[in-house]
Image: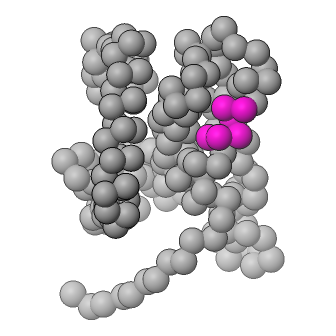
């Protein structure tokens, strides 16, 4: 078992061969499902949340739960990661999955992957001080470090495949329609 000081969950260790087998098997199973019935590719995700404390939120996602909060400077209690940090975490988490998936699929091995996401946000819009700036990130930068035996050209090929297929990167890069309803409880 591998644990780190900054991650509180215990992640089981897995060999490169076991990871490759799991990725190959999952890809084959999905391909078979989709070939048999195209509608099987349509997934639905849902989370439930409730406001707690000053500005914190408890979130339930399947069998997992977590707290979203803000630091004191943004009226929070700093009881959890901020919403924008979770968004960046979702991006890098999805990138790791898709890098591993496409490395296996394209036969482009790497040993380790470490990703840093950094983003700029102008809080003037959040606080109503400047409506001309964007409320969200103005730019996101990903620094992806791969170690392994392949050439830079092969890792560029892998990056292009990941950029074309990463669902969370797509959410960041393209407008997604959002429909909102507000009801009284």
In the image, is residue 141 above or below residue 13? below
Point out the stretch of residues depicted in magenta.
157-162
Q: Is residue 41 left or right of residue 133?
A: left
Asked whether residue 169 is in view, the answer is yes
Asked whether residue 70 is in view, the answer is no
Q: Is residue 14 left or right of residue 174?
A: left
Please tell me which residue is depicted at 79% across the width and 24% down the height of the picture. Answer: 153
Please tell me which residue is depicted at 35% across the width and 22% down the height of the picture. Answer: 21
In the image, is residue 50 above or below residue 157? below
- Name the chief secondary structure element in magenta: helix
Please tell me which residue is depicted at 65% across the width and 49% down the height of the picture. Answer: 164
Q: Is residue 179 magenta?
A: no
Q: Which of the pair 14/18 is nearer the observer?
A: 18
Please tell me which residue is depicted at 42% across the width and 13% down the height of the picture. Answer: 16
Which quadrant: the C terminus?
A: bottom left
Q: Position of residue 178 (x, y in %)?
A: 50, 78
């Amino acid at each position: 078992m591998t644990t780190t000081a900054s991650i509180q969950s215990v992640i089981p260790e897995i060999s490169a061969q076991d990871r490759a087998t799991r990725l190959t098997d999952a890809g084959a199973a999905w391909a078979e499902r989709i070939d048999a019935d195209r509608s099987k590719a349509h997934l639905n995700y849902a989370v439930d949340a409730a406001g707690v404390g000053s500005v914190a939120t408890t979130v339930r996602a399947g069998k997992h739960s977590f707290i979203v909060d803000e630091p004191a400077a943004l009226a929070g209690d700093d009881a959890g990661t901020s919403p924008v940090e979770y968004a960046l975490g979702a991006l890098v988490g999805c990138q790791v999955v898709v890098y591993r998936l496409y490395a296996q699929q394209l036969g482009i091995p790497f040993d380790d992957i470490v990703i840093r996401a950094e983003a700029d946000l102008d809080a003037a819009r959040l606080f109503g001080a400047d409506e001309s700036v964007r409320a969200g990130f103005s730019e996101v930068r990903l620094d992806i470090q791969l170690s392994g035996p392949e050439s830079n050209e092969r890792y560029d090929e892998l990056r292009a495949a990941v950029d074309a297929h990463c669902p969370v990167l797509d959410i960041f890069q393209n407008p997604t329609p959002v429909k909102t309803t507000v009801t009284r409880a």
